[in-house]
Image: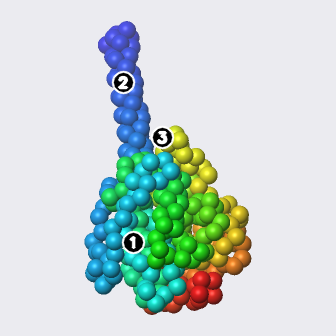
Amino acid sequence: MSRSKRRGRMGIVGWIVLGVLVVGVGTAVWYGNRLIGQSADRLLYPRRSQPSQTPADFDLAAETVRFTTADGITIAAWFVPPPEDGNGAVFIYAHGFGGNRGALLAQAAAMHQAGYGSLLVDLRNHGESGDAISTWGQAESRDLVAAFEYLQTRPEVDSTRIGLVGKSMGGAAAALAASQLPELAVLVLESTYASLEENMPNIMPSIARAPGFLAATVFSRIDSATDEPLTEIRTVAIVENLNMPLLLLHGEQDRIVPVAQGRAIFAAANEPKQLHTIPGAGHLNIFTIDPDTFTEQMRAFLAEHLP
């Protein structure tokens, strides 16, 4: 075989290899961008869910109510009045990402027996509330401010005895709302992240369905998709400026929001404050794993700070 023919065949092989590499790299880039886009969409637009139980399942008399936020979003909620022989204290309950107003219903029912009413909300883009991009606590704080203002119109409620209970994303929203509500009586944060951005690697596998090493890129994508500054969702910094009783509850086996984040919030918060970690509990079962102990911890805290 002549040298020129040999070179020609080697040239053809080289072009084939180069073509395969180009196609492979292009496919990887396309797949990576698609995965990042899908992950961002899952974090911005959760699938709506509806409660599996209602207040009636707990023998609670409830009213379905709606009110509007400052930016025009309609919020749906259940209002459970405080017991008639109580003192008019009511908690606003805010669920986590992808949840609904039924998520904390069992807790609210337990606390009703202790004398506290409840307003269980569907945060924006969840349950039956209005459409909006989910911002992991930033815009959702407006939903809770509107809930607080709604309760002030109810004659059954003592407006000086309103508390906020927020879980996970609802906890971040509750902390942000509390920073705008100095008259709030108490704040309870459950399984709440110290920083959304820093916790993103833990959120990625289960919620965004993508590997943790894409966290920074996906966070940048969702941050650019909304006018809300998601880098400012730093509960650890927000609590430094709050001056109200704070109770933190966190599962010791939480993988979505590790307990170290709850401890960081506690360390940064002002007195009076309490932190209770629940042995064996993950992100979703801090109440159901031991309802009696959970309720006792809540009641002991409230006996001191919202008697």
Q: Please report the residue visible at 36 percent of the width from the left and 56 percent of the height from the top.
A: 129
Dividing the image into 4 quarters, which one contains the C terminus?
bottom right
Residue for badge 2: 19
Which of pointers 1 and 3 lies earlier in the amino acid sequence? 1
Q: Quadrant of residue 261?
A: bottom right
Disc number placed over residue 183 in the picture, else none: none
In terms of secondary structure, where does tag 2 sit?
Answer: helix
Residue for badge 1: 79
How far from the left and from the top, in percent, is residue 168?
49, 66
How far from the left and from the top, in percent, is residue 223?
53, 44
Dividing the image into 4 quarters, which one contains the N terminus?
top left
Q: CA distance from mark 1 to mark 2?
A: 64 Å
Residue for badge 3: 225
The amino acid beneath tag 1 is Phe
Q: Quadrant of residue 268?
A: bottom right
The amino acid beneath tag 2 is Gly
Whether pointer 1 and pointer 2 mark residues with C-beta atoms closer than 8 Å, the reply is no
- From the viewer's perspective, is residue 211 above or below residue 194? above
